Amino acid sequence: MTNKQKRAIALLCALAILLAGLLLATRRGTAPSTPQDAHGHDRGADAAAAQDDAGPRGIALTDAQIKANGIALETAGPAMLGQRLHLPAQVKADAERTVALAAPAPGLVRSVHVAPGALVRKGQALVTIDSPAVAQWRAEAQTARRRLQLARATHAREQMLWEARISARQDLEAAETAMQEAAFAAEAAAQRLRALGIDAGTGVSAAVTVRAPLAGVVVEKPAVAGLAVAEATPLLTIADLAHVWIEAAVPTDSLGQVGTGMAATVSVATQPDAIDGTVAFVGPVLGETTRMATARIVLPNGAGRLRPGMLASVDLAGPRASVPVTVALDAIQTIHEHAVVFVRTRAGFEARDVVTGRSDGRRTEIVRGLAAGEAVAAAGSFLLKAELGKNDAGHDD
């Protein structure tokens, strides 16, 4: 190899080294810079460290972020709680002041004098029925009364004759027996008419008028003019709605917490305000299909605002007791069918499963999973639940 060739090779090696140096310097100059805060600290590293501190069920938040998101903090601690049950209910007519009227005898409905929803007074005419049986019963009652009158007259005559020693003792006794039998027959005929609500009248009319036994509202009216009815065929139903029943369904596992005399708050969707009452009755038998018992609250209804059939809800408040660990009701969230609270940590919050107990609608007992004195998120905790859901979704990806 000549000297000229050696010099050319050396020059090429020098150029290669120079180009490699220039390429390395270019790459170093265009590398991305690490974000820094105003003090020159690495913000990316701080965020990663904070998330590492938060843990797999944690949410990294600074004090400023907590305040900006409106998340309120409270300290778990003791409180006086009363057991409160929230039960579905329905407005019903007072069965003790509801009367179902039936046809007193077979016949045809001549006329119906009221309509459904009508207010009726006690003794008001409701339905008129034409019944041949009623005409016969009235005739029998009148015949029995006349026989009784005749038997009394005969007895009086025999009494006078016996006292005048004109007739024998046995004639007087026979007259007494006949009078007693006539009295029994007349009373039986009158009792049949009274029991069926039929007035005896002075003739043998077949018309019978069914009258209201109490003041109230016509809630059912199956009777129509021209309807052929048998004895005991339903005609209409009257309910006195001055008081109504609120019947709540009580689950089997809550029966031990419900008793008569308990304070109750009734809410009806159509009414702006809740109504206070007390439990008057707890059913001893469970429903065959619902397997629930009935708790009854009796409420005054003078204004007629509560109507049978309306849906309602009942809150029952039991005796109050001291509970060692409680949190506000809105501090508890449900995640994957578990009760969860968000406990304040150095990095932000940690989702922690808890076991809840009694609740009065404002505060809830924590039986297990949280100690008194720990700070938790209350108002705004639903935001943490949503954020935790985003983190879970990101991990799944």
Image: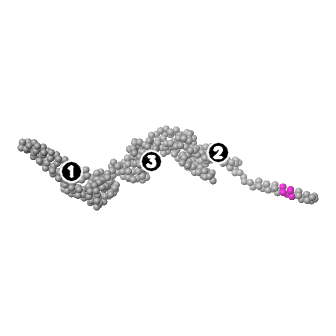
Number of numbered markers: 3
Q: Are marks 2 and 3 in contact (CB under 8 Å)?
A: no
Position in image of residue 73 (x %, y %): 56, 44
Q: CA distance from mark 3 to mark 1?
A: 53 Å
Q: Residues within 10 Å of mark 1 (few under 14, many from 20)?
A: many
Q: CA distance from mark 2 to mark 3?
A: 44 Å
Residue visible at 15% across and 49% down?
148
Query: At label 2, which amino acid type do we have?
Result: Asp
* Residue underneath mark 2: 53
Magenta segment: 12-17
Query: At label 1, which amino acid type do we have?
Result: Ala
The nearer-to-camera label among 3 and 1 is 1
Position in image of residue 269 (x %, y %): 43, 52
Q: Residues within 10 Å of mark 3 (few under 14, many from 20)?
A: some
Q: CA distance from mark 2 to mark 1?
A: 96 Å
Q: Are marks 3 and 1 in contact (CB under 8 Å)?
A: no
Q: Earlier in the sequence, mark 2 or mark 1?
A: 2
Query: At label 3, which amino acid type do we have?
Result: Leu
- Foreground pick, 342 / 208: 208
Query: Principal SS element in the magenta part?
Result: helix
Q: Residues within 10 Å of mark 2 (few under 14, many from 20)?
A: some
Residue 383 belongs to the span the image colors magenta: no
Establish if 3 lies above or below 58.
below
The nearer-to-camera label among 2 and 3 is 3
Position in image of residue 144 (x %, y %): 17, 51
Residue visible at 41% across and 48% down?
287
* Residue underneath mark 3: 87
* Residue underneath mark 1: 189
